[in-house]
Structures are given as structure tokens and as C-alpha cells.
Image (cartoon, rainbow, N blue to C red):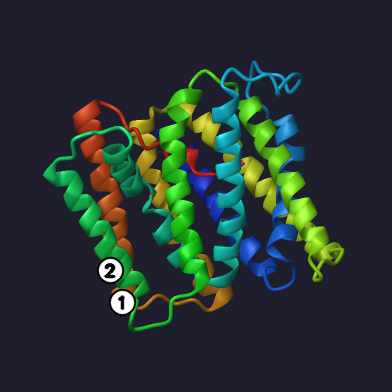
Amino acid sequence: MNGGIFLALCAYAVYAWGDGLIKAIGSQLSVFEIGFFNILFASIFLFFLKPDGERWHGFWHMQRPWAVHARAISGLVAGVLGIYAFTTIPLAEVYALIFLAPLFVTLLSIVVLKEQVGPWRWLAIFAGLVGILLVVRPGFRELELGHFAALIVAFLAAATIILMRSLAGEKQTTMLGVLVGYGLLFNGAAMLATSSFAIPDWKLLLMLVLTGACTAGGHRLQLLATRLSPANQIAPTHYSQIVWAVVIGAAFFAEYPDFIALIGLAVVVGSGLLTLVRERIRLGTVRWNPFSRNRL
């Protein structure tokens, strides 16, 4: 196993444990309070983990302001909805829905970029939808708002992929700095406006610090991974989060996917991998970068 793939696997493990911590906190704090402190502590860690060769000074100087702000707003909404999903439905189901992002990229490419889609990519879309039906099983169980929140997160992640084409030359410190600004302002105002706002005790505060560390640490590991290996090799490691979701969900939250759900998860992963393979054959690269998931 080369170093880039190993670091990518570590990044997604760190992210998954951070999501598990968010789920554990969800019953005690509001979504906005979790979002505020997660971004606050993540930004503190990221301040010292900035990309090499970049400075935080002047991060607000942008080449394409509209695209930077649009990406930040998309990340803000996805972050809030993602926290809500993680705190209300099983981890594995959240990831299964979020993993529809590459399929949404294909659909947006048809609508926005007017691309032609061949039978293999249509097959991947169909398989992904079948996999989700096996996991969620609407009609046989009650769907919750968390399912729809996770689905919107997947769509926003796909929209960000399309949007990122115009941000190729933008500094990472700029995109991160603007996203942090939006996140702190919105979540801070929203948490103070809710009647359930409460100052976290030391145990919750420690868990919030750890969620921020996981967010920042995962982001840094991603950057290091991309320097050692091309995106084509790293992209499939994204699906390792499904394994972590099942393990963490079963070990700490008594979430046990049944046999049909496990088949559905495997189908979702397979459809995503098929999309990646077809993108590589068609374009010689992977357009869907798994590291562009709407995180800090």
C-alpha cells in the first residue's frame, strides 16, 4: 500500500470518528451549537495546519468572489444538515445517502454542462438508487427528516464539484477562511437565538474539541495524501467510511444493519466505484474528487 492511499484511509477514519462524536453529542446540544464549536475548534487547529506556501494574511482577497461565497454557503448549509442527519438517523444510512454525490455529479453534468452520458454511467445511477432503496426501504419503514437532510448534503456536495471548476486557482486559505467566517456567524447567531442554548460542561467541551481536531486532522491528512498519490488511486478509499460507520454504529449506538441493508450498502459502494472507473476511462481522470465533500 502506497503512502497516499494509507493517509487517505486514515483521513476517512478520522472523519468517521469525528462524525461518531457529533452523533454522541447530538442529544445534548442543538445542531447550531455543535456546528459553531466544531468550526471554532477546527479553525484553531487549521490555523496551524495551513497548506504549505500559503498565509492566512489577506485570505479575503479573492479571484472569483461569487464562486468563493457560493461554495462557502453550500458548505455552510451542508454542514448544518450533515450534523442534523448524523444526530437523527444511523451513521451507515447517512453515509449511504451522502455517497450518492458522484451520481448527482453525473446528473448535474447532463443538466448544467450538457454532457452525453453512456449506458455504464446510467447503470451506475440506477444501481445507486436501488442500493439506497435497500438501505432505507421507504414504505416499509418511516423516513425521517434526517434522511432528506443527508440527501440534500449529497446534492450540495455534487454542486460544489461543478462549482470548484471555477475555483482551480483560488487559495485554500481563502476558501477555508470564508467558509469559517460564514459558519461561525450563522451558527453563532442561530445557537444564541434558540431557547435550548446552554454552555457545555467540561466533558461536552472536550468532545467538541475532539470533533474539531478530527475535522482539521482529516483535512490535513487529505492534503498530504493528494501529494503522494493521484486522485485516481485515492478516490476509492472514500468508501472505507461505510465500514467505520457500521463498526462505530454497532459498537456505540446499537445500530445493526440487517442483511438487506448490508447488500444495499455494497450496491451503493459498487455504483460509486463504477462511476469513478467510467470517469477515468472517459476523461483519464476522476472528476469527482472525494476530498471536496463539504467539510472545512
Q: Residues within 10 Å of mark 1 (few under 14, many from 20)?
A: few
Residue 271 is left or right of residue 167, and the answer is left
| Gap between marks 2 and 1 measured at Cα | 6 Å
Q: Position of residue 120 (x, y in %)?
A: 15, 45
Residue 36 is left or right of residue 24, and the answer is right
Residue picked out by circle 1: 259
* Secondary element at tag 1: helix
In the rendered image, which quarter contains the C terminus?
top right
**Figure disc tally:** 2
Task: Choose between 61 and 199: the one closer to the eye.
Answer: 61
Residue 32 is left or right of residue 296, and the answer is right
Most extreme residue toward the bottom is 140
| Residue 105 showing in the rendered view | yes
| Residue 1 showing in the rendered view | no
Q: Position of residue 179 (x, y in %)?
A: 65, 38
Q: Is the C-beta separation of discs 2 and 1 under 8 Å?
A: yes
Q: Position of residue 83 (x, y in %)?
A: 60, 59
State which quadrant residue 202 falls in.
Answer: bottom right
Q: Amino acid at mark 2?
A: Ile
Taking 180 as reference, is 79 above or below it?
below
* Secondary element at tag 2: helix
Give me the residue at 38% from left, 27% from top.
230
Task: Choose between 146 and 242: the one closer to the eye.
Answer: 146
Taking 295 as reference, is 279 above or below it?
above
Residue picked out by circle 2: 263
Give me the residue at 70% from left, 35% from top.
46
Give me the residue at 65% from left, 26% from top.
174
Q: Position of residue 156 (x, y in %)?
A: 47, 47
Q: Amino acid at mark 1?
A: Phe
